[in-house]
Amino acid sequence: MSTRPVAVQATLDDLGTPLSDVTFVVLDLETTGGAPAGRNITEIGAVKVRGGIVLGEFQTLVRPGEPIPAFVSVLTGISNAMVAGAPRIDAVLGPFLDFLGDCVVVAHNAPYDVGFLKAACRDTGAVWPRPAVVDTAHLARQLVTSDEAPNRKLGTLAHLFGAATTPDHRALHDARATVDVLHALTGRVGNLGVHTLEELQTYSKRVSPQQRRKRVIADDLPSAPGVYVFKDANGHALYVGTSVDIKKRVRSYFTESEKRRRMREMVGLAESVTPVVCQTALEAQVRELRLIAQHKPRFNRRSRYPERAVWVKLTQEPFPRLSVVSTVRADARSYVGPFNSRTAAEQAVTAVHDVIPLRQCTKRLSARGGSTACALFDLGKCGAPCIGEQSTDEYADIAADAERLLTTDARPVVDVLTERMERLSDQSRYEDAADVRDRMLSFVRGAARAQRLDPLARTPEVVAARPGAVGGWEVVCVRYGRFAGTTLSPRGADPMPYIAALRETAEVVAAPVAPAPAALTEETEKVLHWLEQPGVRIVHTDGVWVCPINGAAGTRTRLEKQMSLAQGTRADAGDRVAG
């Protein structure tokens, strides 16, 4: 007797929800910046869409619980005056949640927007409906290659996919642009066999069979701190990273936890991993930088081309001027930098010219003059030493002021440019204000870098120690800003014999031309960061290691903090490759 098979219809949960049947609410928020707080929202924009058809839109300004910083106004164009008559979040949240209903939330860098909305519900006593969430930035990191776009920012993706609306940091405009980006991304993922909401949400969790098969690469690696180098079949370096446990970290590249598309591509090419065991975390960081600079692995995004950095120098001549150069030589009164690009260096030069009437012509002038004055003389931005209107002594005072700005006190530049930026912002000239802000930031970053590097670059030797993780001491020797060696003294042992041995065996380093150190700039900055950590003790110093009291470092920290608050947490995490 045969048994007829019984057909069982799959439930909706088994099949999943077809994307064509899903109603999305694509949203964007503007805020005063900083950590998620419901009363810091300044604008909400949202578009309801299903099957490619727009069903409705929601937009409102919101009066926040604190003033909008000038940096945020420059970024978004939303001023305190614009939101003065707007409703508070208490009045806005209810209608927005009604508009949201039981739809799926979509946002670019969704954790940022959802975090603020959750905080708003918490602050006002409303109930967050816990909707399903789709992050277009996360999807783009899986579906858009680095050859197509340099990053996964909304503006970049909108341009790539030909969005009808250009994002401009206004909430509804950005939400409309995100709709077009969402449609383009779901089109791509549909070609890969993803047709339901559930598949869309879990797409990035796939691990290819090829990726799983290569886990054996990590089997013989040491469970120790250090550097690891992925190599292809020809022995060429693909990627360099660091970890406190090399074996465990390398294994993670072959598991579900590795979601970066570029790293999965790298793993597909990798055939071996070379470990470099290090005694200390600082040694590992330094060796990583040196290996990246040496091999320039294609999958490392940072630190590959340190030779492209440029400096700004105040020339050593009767009438000094500012010049952008690629090398530090003993031919200038002072240097600032290095800058990561010529554009940043030129912005810093412009910032100084905004405050100090240095000549801007490139010809070499004699004390006798005899040339022809340019338009800057008529504008009052130059004293025209080229035609003898300024003596070398008179110009020397101006050059001395410029040198003080570069080497000891950046406050005059910051004060003048901050006032100008705020004035332009009050006049709603936000693009002009942003240009002034960028010049100011470029200047203080370059000046702060040089002022921090210079003292260590001139110091023949610094030996420092800090307590080890399991007792004893972690000792580092630095010569002219270069990591020269390290050692560990065992717990309970006298560290002085170990320190003496380190000083005898550490790398011999030739004196550089300061402020450039005898190492990669990023290496010296890693060393400085380590030296400034709590618990670090200076054991020996050969030379004088001091920094200017009114230097640019403090100003840079303050300005960058304001920038971070202005931009919130929208930085694209996919552009940063962790070790």
Image (cartoon, rainbow, N blue to C red):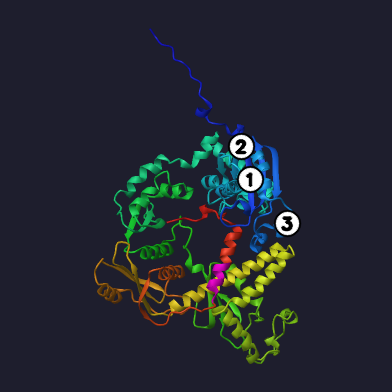
Q: Amino acid at mark 1?
A: Leu
The spot of residue 304 in percent (x, y) is 46, 62
Q: Quadrant of residue 322?
A: bottom right
Question: Farthest residue in the front direction?
Answer: 125
Q: Which residue lies under the disc numbered 3? A: 84
For the residue marked with disc 2, what is the amino acid? Answer: Cys
Q: Are marks 2 and 3 in contact (CB under 8 Å)?
A: no
51 up-or-down from 415: above or below = above
Residue 327 visible from this viewpoint = no
User: What's the magenta region?
Assistant: 551-558
Gap in angstroms between the C-alphas marked 2 and 1 = 12 Å
Q: Earlier in the sequence, mark 2 or mark 1?
A: 1
Residue drawn at point x = 63 percent, y = 50 percent: 29
Report the residue at 63% width, 89% height from top. Answer: 366
Gap in angstroms between the C-alphas marked 3 and 1: 23 Å
Q: Main secondary structure of the magenta part?
A: helix
Q: Decide which of 169, 561 is in the foreground and name it.
A: 561
Image quarter for residue 182? top right
* Up/down of 376 relative to 18, above or below: below
Nearest-to-viewer mark from 3 and 1: 3
Residue denoted by label 2: 103
Say which label, 2 or 3, has the lower sequence index. Answer: 3
Under mark 3, the amino acid is: Ala
Provide the secondary structure element on which disc 1 rests.
strand
* Quarter of the image with the C terminus in it: bottom left
- List the residue tagged with mark 1: 27
Which type of secondary structure does the marked residue at label 2 adopt? loop
Indicate which disc, 3 or 1, sits on the residue closer to the N terminus.
1
Quarter holding the N terminus is top left
The answer to whether residue 471 shows anywhere in this view is yes
